[in-house]
Image: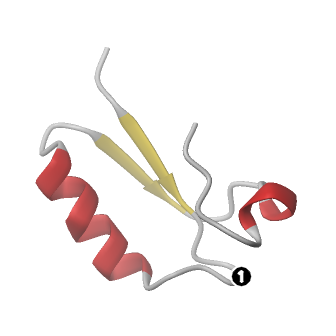
Amino acid sequence: MGNVFRICDECRTPNAKTLTQKRKQIDPDAEIEVGCQSYCGPGLKRHLHL
């Protein structure tokens, strides 16, 4: 099973395009999901990586 990166593009997020490109550099084979991830509480102050 490969890595999955989930990037929120709805609220208070860094540029989703830039973040997507950086994640592709880290793991080119990873699945990247862009959209609301419902992690607004913990993700407001810093990036949330699970």
Instruction: Where is residue 22? Give x, y as percent.
Output: 23, 65
Q: Is 50 rendered above or below residue 24? A: above
Q: Is 9 rendered above or below residue 1? A: below
Q: Secondary structure at mark 1?
A: loop
Instruction: Where is residue 43? Give x, y as percent.
Output: 72, 62
Residue positioned 59% across, 67% down in the render? 8
Quarter assignment of residue 28: top left
Around disc 1, counting alpha carbons within 10 Å, would you say few (fewer than 14), some (14 to 19), or many (20 or more)?
few
Q: Quadrant of the N terminus?
A: top left
Residue positioned 80% across, 56% down in the render? 42
Instruction: Where is residue 7? Give x, y as percent.
Output: 51, 61
Q: Nearer the viewer, residue 26 or 45?
A: 45
Quarter assignment of residue 30: top left
| Left or right of residue 48: residue 29 | left
Q: Quadrant of the C terminus?
A: top right
Residue positioned 27% across, 56% down in the render? 23
| Left or right of residue 3: residue 25 | left
| Left or right of residue 4: residue 44 | right
| Left or right of residue 7: residue 32 | left
Residue positioned 77% across, 71% down in the render? 44
Q: Residue furthest front?
A: 45
Q: Nearer the viewer, residue 47 or 24?
A: 47
Q: Is 16 rendered above or below residue 40? A: below
Q: Is 23 rendered above or below residue 1? A: below
Per the image, the residue denoted by label 1 is 11
Name the amino acid, label 1: Cys
